[in-house]
Amino acid sequence: MKLADIYILQQLWESALVTLKEAEQISPNDDDILKRELYVSLYLEPPQSFRTALPIAEKLISNPNTANDPAVRLWQAAALGQKFKYLYDAGESLSSAGETESAESVRSKALQAVRAVVQLAPDPNSAPRIFLRRIFDPAREQSPPAENDLEVFKGDADFELAIYGGEQESRAPAGHGSR
């Protein structure tokens, strides 16, 4: 684990992931190792990033010990954002790559993951919620521009509402919601 931490600090993502996989073989039921694998996999190049991250996220979500961890849902949302962008940039579904998921299906899953983060971390000032806003709109949140896994959904009203909540209501046109 310490070696993986060193690789992470050096941003040697593939080396970190290989080292974490070795640690997982030694301790196969260690949730912390899986969570680190999930996090590290997001820094690989797409499509390897989301193809590695999403099965790990599903494994963690199906585990009662980590199912309600907002960080797991946050990283799942990030991986889905990467997958959506990959599909969007390719202008096609992944069917040509041997997969059959549509961009709309990925968008729906990403929105579901974002809503899970908000539900599991209701405090807007909690770390998961702050990071969620940062990867959605780095310019607005004054965060590193490269940390933008959900930025592909910027301007999508459903994502705006899920992530910013009440702030969106104040931007609604006059007459909406009033009697």
Image: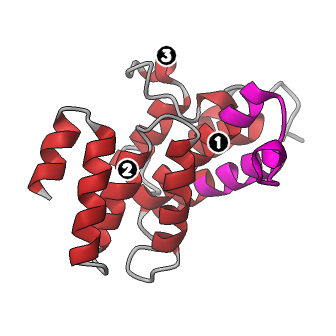
Characterize the magenta stretch by its predominant secondary structure: helix
Q: Which mark is residue 97?
A: none
Residues at marks 1 and 3, CA–CA distance in whole angstroms: 21 Å
Residue 109, image x, y percentages:
70, 55
- Magenta extent: 86-113
> Secondary structure under badge 1?
helix
Type of residue at label 2?
Answer: Tyr
Q: Quadrant of residue 160?
A: top right
- Among numbered discs 2 and 3, the one appearing first in the sequence: 2
Please give the residue where the numbered disc 3 appears in the rendered image.
139
Residue 111, image x, y percentages:
68, 50
Rendered position, 26 above or below 53: below
Residues at marks 2 and 3, CA–CA distance in whole angstroms: 22 Å
> Secondary structure under badge 2?
helix
Please give the residue where the numbered disc 2 appears in the rendered image.
39
In the image, taking residue 174 as reference, residue 52 lies left or right, namely left
Residue drawn 75% across the image and 45% down it:
97
Rendered position, 26 above or below 55: below
Type of residue at label 1?
Answer: Lys
Q: Nearer the viewer, mark 2 or mark 3?
A: 2
Check disc 1: other Cα within 10 Å, few if <14, some if 14-19, many if 20+: many
Please give the residue where the numbered disc 1 appears in the rendered image.
83
In the image, taking residue 93 as reference, residue 138 lies left or right, namely left
Residue 95 among those drawn in magenta: yes
Residue 14, image x, y percentages:
33, 43
Residues at marks 2 and 1, CA–CA distance in whole angstroms: 15 Å
In the image, taking residue 158 as reference, residue 16 lies left or right, namely left
Rendered position, 56 above or below 135: below
**Residue 126 seen in the current view:** no
Residue drawn 82% across the image and 43% down it:
96
